[in-house]
């Protein structure tokens, strides 16, 4: 017996796991040239860089009531924003083993609020139902292997225009939240007007936040947007206290009575597919497709860019291991965002900050996700931050997204005009659907009339037909 046991022990010792145990085996940390300490620090940096979404997303989704008179509570919105980000990011780390973080996507959240709830008259559950469906469609497309065909079908310039258009859209939302750009009155031929109240304390808070964000980003400071939100909120609190609480009310720009609270999960599961009955099948389908394309292209571009930065892309073939799994997780995360009422979740380019700190594996994402989970306890803070303090983040992110315009071939009118229409119409009509639709239809029409009908992928013809129907019967 003793000899057998000794033999077993010896056998076990020769097959013992390498240093790091489970973490090393699962994440292949050493193989990718990293360490556990480096991965954890990288995860913390990524969280600090993108934690601004915990306050910006609730601010956007809280900004208006739906057709039933329901306004989503800020405390619950912070909870679900953190919850969806935590689940999606941890899943990306464990199953994708990449240092990519996931959270509510700017642009799509604004479209949910202003396009679906504001303009289309959907209730919040119905609007979130749209997001659940588009996320599931992305997941199905990835599973059946259609993602490559979709990428081939859409010219690069049009894909970039969609991203730039969303950037312009959220920048306008930011200026609107700051009180600088106001919606035009009914009957006014202008899309928006400039408010004359440019010397208010509300505007001052926005300007201070925008300057801080711009300077810190230019200097390469990690967490610049979060620092901007905190600094401008403190400034707003000082102003509000000095004015006797006349500038902001209802707890906004006030010292919170508590910092931590039990998470409010009341919005989880509050989604409905009744939007199909409200909008009609054709219009609903067009909207879902437009949102899906926007989400899909954004994720593809972000994932490949982050993969290159992390050294995970095979430059000889241009492929990245587990890309299909990464896109599947992202699609399911989008659906999860709708199911939790936090809007569509997507992979964040801010993950590059953690990669820049040496993050190379999914342990970075798991660390970031755990921090998002802890952030669910910070709900009381969401009600303190004024919209003028979160607006600079929208403007800055919008400006960064507009950088995609630089790689559009503006010398080719066949892509330049569709790209311009896509970029301008999104913010002008507060609709991603309209921008995507105008871009696709104009691209196909120009290609056909210039004598190159065979140069248009069949999928684009189908999309052009769908959006033509949408513009005629669905109304802009």
Image (cartoon, rainbow, N blue to C red):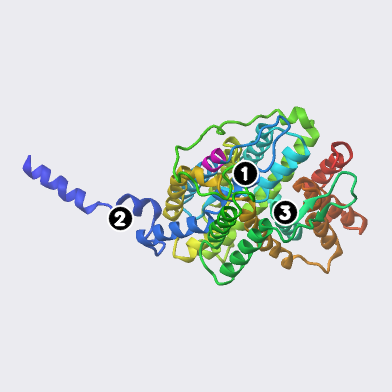
Residue 248: percent from left, percent from top: 63, 48
Residue 198 is inside the magenta segment = no
Q: Which of marks 1 and 2 precedes in the sequence? A: 2
Element at badge 1?
loop
Give the label on residue 179, or none: 3
Q: Quadrant of residue 476?
A: top right
Q: Is residue 308 above or below residue 374?
A: below
Q: Is residue 27 above or below residue 67?
A: below
Element at badge 3?
loop
Residue 253 seen in render? yes
- From this viewpoint, which residue is outermost toward the left? 2
Give the Cα separation between the discs numbered 2 and 1: 35 Å
Give the Cα separation between the discs numbered 1 and 3: 26 Å
Give the residues in magenta: 75-79
Residue shown at 73%/52% (left/top)? 176
Give the label on residue 20, or none: 2
Residue 250: percent from left, percent from top: 60, 42
């Amino acid at each position: 017996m003793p000899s057998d046991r000794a033999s077993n022990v010896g056998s076990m010792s020769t097959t013992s796991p390498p240093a790091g145990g489970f973490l090393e085996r699962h994440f292949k940390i050493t193989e990718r040239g990293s360490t556990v300490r480096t991965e954890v620090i990288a995860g913390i940096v990524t969280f600090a860089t993108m934690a601004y979404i915990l306050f910006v997303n609730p601010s956007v989704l809280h900004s208006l009531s739906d057709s039933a008179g329901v306004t989503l509570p800020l405390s619950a919105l912070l909870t679900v924003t953190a919850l969806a980000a935590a689940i999606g990011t941890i899943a990306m780390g464990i199953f994708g083993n990449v240092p990519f973080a996931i959270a509510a996507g700017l642009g799509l959240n604004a479209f949910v609020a202003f396009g679906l709830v504001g303009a289309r008259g959907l209730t919040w559950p119905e609007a979130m139902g749209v997001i659940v469906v588009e996320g599931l469609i992305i997941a199905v497309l990835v599973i059946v292997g259609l993602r490559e065909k979709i990428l081939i079908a859409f010219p690069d310039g049009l894909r970039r225009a969609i991203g730039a258009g969303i950037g312009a859209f959220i920048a306008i939302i930011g200026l609107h939240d700051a009180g600088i750009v106001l919606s035009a009155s009914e009957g006014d031929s202008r899309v928006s007007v400039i408010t004359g109240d440019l010397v208010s304390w509300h505007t001052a808070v926005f300007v201070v936040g925008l300057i801080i964000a711009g300077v810190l980003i230019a200097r390469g400071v990690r967490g610049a947007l979060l620092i901007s939100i905190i600094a401008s909120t403190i400034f707003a609190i000082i102003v509000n206290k000095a004015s006797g609480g006349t500038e902001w009310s209802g707890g906004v720009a006030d010292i919170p009575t508590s910092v931590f609270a039990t998470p409010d999960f009341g919005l989880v599961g509050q989604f409905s597919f009744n939007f199909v009955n409200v909008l009609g099948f054709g219009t609903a389908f067009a909207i879902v497709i437009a949102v899906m394309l926007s989400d899909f292209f954004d994720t593809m571009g972000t994932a490949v860019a982050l993969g290159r930065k992390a050294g995970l892309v095979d430059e000889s073939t241009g492929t990245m291991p587990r890309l299909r799994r990464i896109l599947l997780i992202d699609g399911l995360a989008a659906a999860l965002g709708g199911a939790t009422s936090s809007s569509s979740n997507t992979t964040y380019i801010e993950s590059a900050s953690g990669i820049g700190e040496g993050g190379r594996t999914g342990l970075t994402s798991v660390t970031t996700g755990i921090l998002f989970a802890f952030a669910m306890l910070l709900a009381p803070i969401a009600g303190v931050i004024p919209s003028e303090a979160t607006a600079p983040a929208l403007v800055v992110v919008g400006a960064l997204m507009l950088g995609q315009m630089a790689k559009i071939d503006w010398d080719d009118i066949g892509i330049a005009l569709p790209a311009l229409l896509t970029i301008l119409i999104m913010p002008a009509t507060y609709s991603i659907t309209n921008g995507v639709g105008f871009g696709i239809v104009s691209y196909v029409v120009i290609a056909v009339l210039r004598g190159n009908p065979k140069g248009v992928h069949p999928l684009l013809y189908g999309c052009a037909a769908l959006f033509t129907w949408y513009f005629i019967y669905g109304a802009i």
